[in-house]
């Protein structure tokens, strides 16, 4: 009898623990098996709530986008229920929030989620595709989790448990760890809501590769609607690049698993159109056109993914309170976009010359291009003020400048540190030290960062930050580059066959939707093949082209290399001609930089190769 009583007592104890556990986390169920009207249903079981009312939020904005995207507008049929299944009163004060009455009786909320990819370009939203969502039944689901999962007011720091039911044929690529062994259910646990948002998930038929770099597992997952591109096609270059990045970074290793989720969009139907990537602390979501030639896709991924991967330094390891305790609906922005995006973009270029993936001249050309582009924005705009107010006009219109001037700010800080230390240290050493001081779980105060940097470097670096970053003075780039022996020069730059300076077309379309050559003086590609103004291009390398796929031709031509065989069919004065020859890419004379001061060679080598 005593044994039975103990057993009952133990069972009651287990039930009590289970009940308590239920109240200590937020449980989310997402059903990907039942897609209705291009929507999926989400059920959120509430934690214990003591207040009479609560508000459930879907994010207005998420880290890394710096724009108000209002994901709540994609939520339909929101309902709240008590434990007996009775509906509770719900108000909907704005696009992203639902105010629930009798919250202390709340058991769960349910709602349906629509996706963003198939309505891009319709004027409904301007969400950047890598931050968007996709629902294609039995084929592909892009779960940027901020578009599917919300949070209760004051409860975003509670643990989350995500249970996702899905077709057995689809596999989840993510940095989450699945705690359910079945083929149709995944269970992901997360310590807090920001961690949920930081873990995107892509469901598709398995096409992935994995490799390990210094103890970090890397996952490359690809969704290609027509099967044109496989993960194995791009992995060798991605692995070479990421190994080079880890060699460059050294001891910084903020995550044990990193996932690259690549969605290749089908341009022939309503689909994602915003090409690029969005960083997360343990992963990157990428959207690119499937039609892009493989060589060009790989080249683009090297730049895009390397940038996002370097975010494991900042903001993952180094970030302010505004980032750590990010408010998804009434956010306070940090002053230091120059570091989060600028240093990251600088590293994405510096590591390539450091590791021998590009030449010094190619690196200078990239920096020259950033200088030229950044001057299209205000050179006197206070960069920290812009960052703090990036969601508002006129500052939001200057956001792209964080990838331009932000990277140049990082370059100048790097140069200043190198000069101060005779080349022994640079900005990477600074970021390592800041990472050791703070780390992923210890945010800094925005107002303290410049002082902290000064302590780790020198007063000259602090002066630079105050004058050129939080001040209104234009940066004298030539003065800083000269410290490394690099001066202005006219340099040659490889062009593309059908675009001058990558923007002015050498082709047009006639009334019959045919591709017609425009005047192209000095274009070596056309001169070598004997092409003339007014020639109509009908076929290139066996593929017919016209208005409908001219974009394909231009994209494909960007991957051509000197010496490749090429065949064209053209019409000249009404007569068809076949043209065969070799590709000779045009060159352009542009303003740039080169190393010219020999006495600075040792310092320059430390900067670029140290």
Image (spheres, rainbow, N blue to C red):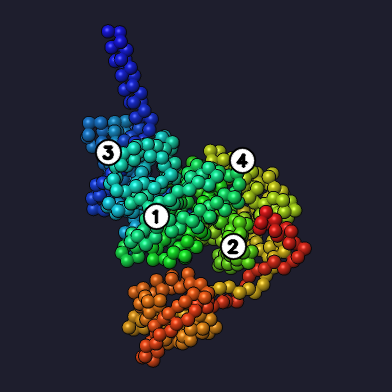
Name which of mark 3 and mark 2 comes first in the sequence.
3
How packed mark 4 is, by other alpha carbons closer than 10 Å (few <14, some 14-19, many 20 or more), is: few
- What residue is at 62 percent from the left and 64 percent from the top? 359
Task: Find disc 4 in the rendering and name its residue.
Answer: 436
Label 1–label 2 contact, CB within 8 A: no
Q: Quadrant of residue 373?
A: bottom right
Secondary structure of the residue carrying numbered label 3: strand
Task: Find disc 2 in the rendering and name its residue.
Answer: 358
Q: Quadrant of residue 227?
A: bottom left
Name which of mark 2 and mark 4 comes first in the sequence.
2
| Nearest the eye: 99 or 248 | 248
Secondary structure of the residue carrying numbered label 1: strand
Q: Is residue 286 left or right of residue 335?
A: left
Q: Residue furthest top?
A: 1
Name which of mark 4 and mark 1 comes first in the sequence.
1
Label 1–label 3 contact, CB within 8 A: no
Distance of label 1 from label 3 (alpha carbons)? 37 Å
Circle on res. 80: 3
- The picture places residue 285, in percent across and down from the top left corner, at 43, 53
Circle on res. 553: none
Q: Residue furthest right?
A: 599
Q: Is residue 408 left or right of residue 13?
A: right
């Amino acid at each position: 009898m005593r044994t039975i009583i103990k057993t009952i007592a133990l069972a009651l104890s287990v039930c009590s623990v289970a009940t308590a556990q239920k109240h200590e986390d937020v449980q989310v169920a997402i059903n990907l098996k039942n897609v209705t009207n291009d929507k999926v249903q989400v059920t959120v079981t509430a934690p214990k709530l003591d207040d009479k009312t609560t508000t459930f939020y879907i994010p207005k904005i998420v880290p890394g986008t710096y724009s108000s995207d209002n994901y709540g507008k994609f939520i339909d049929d929101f309902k709240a229920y008590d434990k007996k299944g009775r509906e509770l009163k719900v108000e909907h004060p704005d696009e992203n929030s639902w105010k629930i009455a009798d919250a202390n009786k709340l058991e769960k909320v349910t709602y349906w989620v629509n996706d963003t990819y198939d309505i891009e370009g319709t004027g409904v939203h301007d969400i950047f595709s890598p931050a968007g969502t996709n629902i294609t039944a039995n084929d592909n689901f892009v779960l940027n989790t901020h578009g599917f999962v919300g949070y209760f007011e004051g409860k975003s720091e509670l643990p989350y448990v995500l249970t996702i039911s899905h077709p057995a044929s689809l596999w989840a690529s993510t940095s989450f760890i699945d705690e359910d062994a079945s083929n149709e259910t995944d269970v992901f646990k997360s310590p807090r809501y920001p961690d949920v948002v930081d873990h995107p998930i892509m469901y598709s038929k398995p096409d992935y590769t994995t490799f390990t770099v210094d103890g970090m597992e890397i996952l490359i997952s690809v969704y290609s609607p027509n099967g044109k591109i496989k993960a194995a096609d791009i992995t060798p270059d991605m692995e070479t690049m990421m190994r080079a990045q880890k060699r460059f970074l050294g001891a910084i290793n903020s995550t044990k698993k990193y996932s690259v989720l690549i969605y290749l969009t089908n341009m022939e139907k309503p689909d994602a159109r915003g090409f690029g990537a969005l960083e997360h602390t343990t992963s990157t979501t990428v959207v690119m056109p499937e039609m892009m030639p493989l060589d060009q896709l790989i080249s683009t991924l090297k730049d895009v993914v390397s940038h996002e991967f370097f975010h494991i330094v900042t903001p993952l390891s180094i970030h302010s309170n505004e980032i750590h305790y990010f408010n998804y609906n009434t956010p306070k922005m940090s002053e230091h976009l120059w570091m989060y995006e600028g240093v990251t973009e600088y590293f994405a270029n510096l590591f390539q010359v450091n590791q021998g993936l590009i030449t010094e001249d190619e690196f200078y050309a990239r920096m020259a291009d950033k200088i030229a582009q950044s001057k299209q924005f205000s050179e006197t705009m206070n960069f920290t003020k812009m960052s703090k107010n990036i969601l508002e006009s006129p500052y939001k219109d200057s956001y792209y400048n964080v990838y331009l001037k932000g990277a140049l700010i990082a370059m100048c800080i790097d140069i200043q540190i190198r000069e101060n230390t005779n080349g022994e240290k640079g900005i990477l050493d600074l970021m390592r030290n800041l990472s050791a001081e703070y780390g992923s779980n210890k945010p800094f105060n925005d107002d303290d960062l410049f002082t902290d940097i000064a302590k780790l470097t020198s007063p000259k670096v602090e002066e630079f930050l105050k004058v050129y970053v939080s001040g209104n003075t234009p940066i004298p780039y030539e003065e800083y580059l000269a410290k490394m022996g690099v001066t202005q020069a006219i340099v040659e730059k490889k062009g593309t066959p059908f675009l001058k300076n990558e923007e002015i077309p050498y082709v047009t379309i006639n009334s019959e939707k045919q591709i017609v050559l425009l005047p192209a003086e000095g274009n070596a590609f056309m001169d070598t093949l004997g092409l003339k103004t007014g020639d109509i291009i009908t076929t290139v390398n066996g593929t017919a082209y016209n208005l409908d796929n001219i974009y394909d031709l231009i994209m494909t031509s960007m991957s051509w290399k000197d010496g490749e065989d090429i065949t064209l069919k053209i019409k000249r004065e009404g007569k068809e001609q076949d043209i065969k020859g070799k590709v000779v890419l045009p060159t352009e004379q542009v303003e740039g930089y080169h190393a010219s001061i020999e006495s600075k060679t040792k310092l320059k080598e430390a900067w670029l190769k140290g």
